[in-house]
Amino acid sequence: MSVSSTSTTSSTGLTSITGSSAASSTGGTYGLSGSGIDVDALVKKLMAGQQAVDDALVQKQTVLQWQKAAYNTVTDDLNNFSTNTVFNYKLQATLSPNLVTSSNTSVATATANAGAANITHSLVVSQLASGVNLTSSKSISAANQTLGNLETQMGLNANSFTFTISNGSSVSQPITIDPSSDSINDVVSAINNAGVNVTASYDSTLDRVFLSTTNTGSSTGISMSSTSTDATSFINGLNLFPTTSPVTDSNGVVTTGGESTSGDTTTFTSTPGQDAQFTLDNATLTESKNAFTISGVTYNLTGVSPTTTSGSSATQTPTTISVAADIDTEVANIQTFVNSYNTMLAEVNGDISQARYTDYPPLTSAQESAMSASDITLWNAKAQSGMLYNDDTLTSLVNTMRNAISSPISGIAPTNVNGTSVTYNTAASIGITTGSYTENGKLYLNKDTLRAALQANPNVLQQIFGTSGTSTTVNGVTTTNTATQGIAGRLSDAIKNTTTQLTQIAGTTVNASYDTSSNLAKQIASYTTQITAAQATFSTMQSQYYTQYNAMEVALQSLSAQSSWITSMTSTTSS
């Protein structure tokens, strides 16, 4: 007679223990003696008590795992709310966005950061910044020659040479060329890879080379220099630099248009780029680029200011750049905050108020096998309900969140509104209020009230949401006075404290697979140990029962054999 026990997986995904009916004799589940005793049924009934104990352990562990998963979910959502919403409401970009307009976008457009003053600027652009562009003045190939190596195409000597390409005085790079093997495209590639902010191209149809600086300003300029006469011939052959009659200065430097010779070095130089020249609020300024930032405003120059002629005088028309608070965006940002806050609050409130049905424990495999799929779904919905019911940590967070919104921020000076002193120091004072008590702290935004507050005090959102608050440090521990802290800081700190506690209780989703230190992980591990021990006990008890019934069957079989022999002997004697 063989004896075995099995463990099965319940609908929770955990291992549960079930008695086996695998133990049997060669005669089936009934006794070898022909007694008609259903041994399996008897053993199953005898094991029912132990099975109940074992199932209870699995069910308790399952509840803990469900609870751990519920904690992990709310922790993730709190972290996301803090990172993706609350953090943004500490930033000026969210609390004080600016709206910038230009009276002439063909001259300039502009944007402003949150620190820019809400004023109007006057801008006159007399010159745009530019770089350097060079184009071959004529074909570079020798007569009747086509694209090939430089020796063939341009009629150069076969000797290798090196020239240095520079952009202004700041960057330069030597380039070595072998005319017998390199083509003009190889030269173009070498210039593009030189890292001197110069791009090159060659148009085979026009048979011309094009060079351009990628930067702008008066410090830019393309130059090529070398001590090699072969390099000089090559550079001349590119027809990029204009040539005029030679001029020798007082230092003996010979210049021919863009070409100059100093000692053994010949240098070909372009006309430099030019700076942007403009007048901003009556100050004459220059910039090397057409896009620049001054006092928090980023200007993008797009053209020269138009000129108006009156009699014999000509003046350029100023462009007005106006920086003002973007109240529409501010209101939209606060509505986004209110919506996100309500979503997070509803989730936490839902977790702590969801009913717990203790009469619906996790199903065992045996129970599931006797139920329909729809019944299992309904049962599990009840069984998994209320995993965080009345949780102290989350209840405390809800109270802290409500206080963060409703409590005034101290230290905010009153605002003069049409001769009346008004203090904007609470969410309610700018139109953010809670609904009825039954709505559990849900927020509502009165946009008209908020607009009025923003018009009266453009800094009101920064004061109510973004104020960092005063803090003190004792023995290396810094504590912030929440009474002086803005709403965003209060919420951020509250969520951080809560998620730290929740992580200690249940770990996080990220470390769920290897969490051994959280409180629930330790309890789950303890149940795993108990379940393993229970499996061993179950197997031992079941084996003992089968062994006992097997011995009984052997005895009955022996007794039956003896009875048959006696009957046989009696029948023989009677004959």
Image: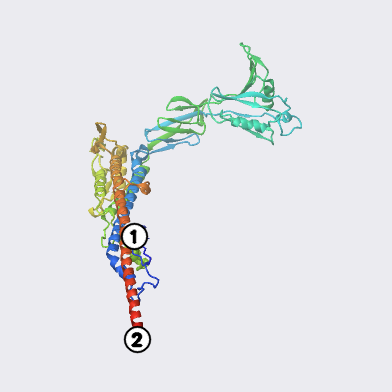
Quarter of the image where the C terminus is located: bottom left
* Residues at marks 2 and 1, CA–CA distance in whole angstroms: 61 Å
Q: Earlier in the sequence, mark 2 or mark 1?
A: 1
Q: Residue furthest top?
A: 250
Q: In screen coordinates, is 502 left or right of 133?
A: left
Mark 1 burial class by Cα count in 10 Å: few <14, some 14-19, many 20+: many
Look at the image and tell me whether residue 420 can be seen. no
Q: In screen coordinates, is 198 left or right of 327?
A: right
Q: Find numbered disc 1 in the image and state the secondary structure of the residue it sits on.
A: strand
* CB contact under 8 Å: marks 2 and 1: no
Residue for badge 2? 573
Q: Position of residue 190 (x, y in %)?
A: 62, 30
> Quadrant of residue 414 in the image?
top left
Q: Residue at coordinates 26% horizontally, 58% vertically from top-left?
A: 356
Amino acid type of disc 1? Answer: Ser
Q: Position of residue 552 (x, y in %)?
A: 31, 71
Q: Position of residue 570 (x, y in %)?
A: 33, 84
> Quadrant of residue 19 in the image?
bottom left
Q: Mark number for residue 16?
A: 1
Please say if 45 is above or below 282.
Answer: below
Q: Which residue occupies the foreground of this view, 169 or 524?
A: 524
Quarter of the image where the N terminus is located: bottom left
Please say if 366 is above or below 165.
Answer: below
> Quadrant of residue 87 in the image?
top left
Q: Which residue occupies the foreground of this view, 466 or 77?
A: 77
